[in-house]
Image: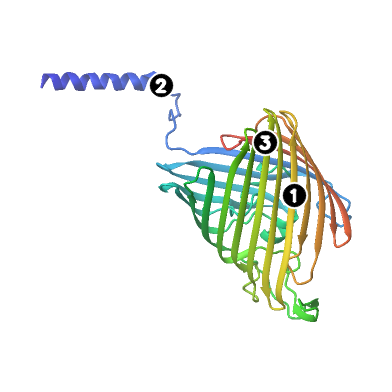
Amino acid sequence: MKKTFIFISLLAAVSAAMAQEGGTPPQGMRGTPANLPDISMIGVVEGYLSSDKSDEEKGKLEFSEVETAFQGYIYPEMRADVFLALHKHEGSYESEICEAKVSFLRLAEGLSAELGKIHLDFGKLNRAHTHTRAMIDQPAVLTGFLGAHALNPQGGTLKYLLPLPFYARLQAGAWDGAPHEHHVDAENTADVVDVDGSTVTVVLEPGETSDFSPAGKLYTWRFNMSFPLSAGSELELGTSYLKGKGSHYEHHRDDIRLAGADFTLKLWPSAYRRLTLQSEYMRLTREVPVGKLERDGLYAFANWRFSKYWDIGARFDYAEGAFPAMSRERDYSLIATRRLTETTTLRAQYKHVNLDGGKTDQAWFQLTFGLGPHSHELE
């Protein structure tokens, strides 16, 4: 009994000493916070110029985006990531959930999963948040086939890391994407050219001539692999597939299939020098009342990091419109990036747009900064 009492007294003394080691917290403070997520913030300031006199957004310098991140482990090998954002869109700020997901990091050997509202892992760029890309705007093929913003439906995906001597991952997902909301005006019609060359009269709907993205029940598949070519080079290859509905499926037939292939080659001649060559190709097959449409799009991007602080890049875009009235867009971009710190970046971009022969010159200036653990190197 005496030994038990001595042991309990000794344990209490050690616990008291450990509690006093950090000092007494100031009045009104709880001391060391426990069970709180990592909280971060990303801010984006942009200026925009355009030779298009009808462009109402030109000549503005404004805070275009604020993103907050709440991240942390909620169970061993299980974490939650929530990204909330305010975006400037058509003159006003709109709030949205960019991503809100739970990741199961190890369901079994090589098997993981994600559930929630997620940037779809289709190709290379849709998965990345805009502030992590090495360019200011989005390639035309992504805007035309996946939507003006990143495609991030609700659902889940299973991922399997294949037991190979190099990185290779296979994944499959099921999703639910929101359709466009609009009203049909039966008096608002237009004659469009069908796939067989004939003219068909169709009802136009607000947004039908400009906005398209996958929606409804979506099913996806992706396989990608990467391996070193030498001590200073790496090659990544990927292929993606999506089957589902188009964004106007609630108003008329709109069945789609989207296939893509991508590659990324990185070369490191020295510690602060890196050449990145990246390209994506996509083919959209869309079945609508006027017939079956097949549309192609791609981009090719090259970026040269020639010092610790400077990057220069160039990009070519080609995209065919997703709608019955065929359109073709060819863009040429030049990009320069100055990294002030690992979390603060200055970037300028010039783009020449050729849309069905109509030419426009555009330019952006962007300041991106981050605070908190999510504010990683912005590349």
**Callout 2 crowding tier (Cα within 10 Å): few <14, some 14–19, many ≥20:** few
User: Left or right: where does residue 222 sit relative to residue 326?
Assistant: left
- Could you tell me if residue 9 is visible in this image? yes
Quarter of the picture holding the N terminus: top left
Say which residue label 1 marks: 300
Q: Looking at the image, tell me whether mark 2 or mark 1 is earlier in sequence order.
A: 2
**Mark found first going from the N terminus, 3 or 1:** 1
What residue sits 77% from the left and 77% below the top?
Answer: 194
Could you tell me how far apart the alpha carbons at marks 3 and 2 are, in whole angstroms? 35 Å
Q: Disc 3 marks which residue?
A: 369
Image coordinates for residue 146, horizontal then vertical, percent? 66, 59
Name the amino acid type tagged 3.
Phe
Q: Is residue 255 toward the left or the right of residue 290 in the image?
A: left
> What's the amino acid at mark 2?
Thr
What's the distance in space between the residues labelled 3 and 1, CA to CA?
Answer: 27 Å
Left or right: 317 in relation to 87: right
Q: How many marks?
A: 3
The amino acid pointed to by label 1 is Ala
The image quarter in which residue 320 lies: bottom right
Task: Indicate which disc, 3 or 2, sits on the residue closer to the N terminus.
Answer: 2
Q: Residue 374 placed where, x, y %?
A: 58, 38
**What residue is at 81 percent from the left and 62 percent from the top?**
328
* 3D distance between C-alphas at marks 2 and 1: 59 Å
Q: Quadrant of the C terminus?
A: top right
Label 1 crowd bin: few (<14), some (14–19), many (20+), radius 10 Å: some
Residue tagged by mark 2?
A: 24
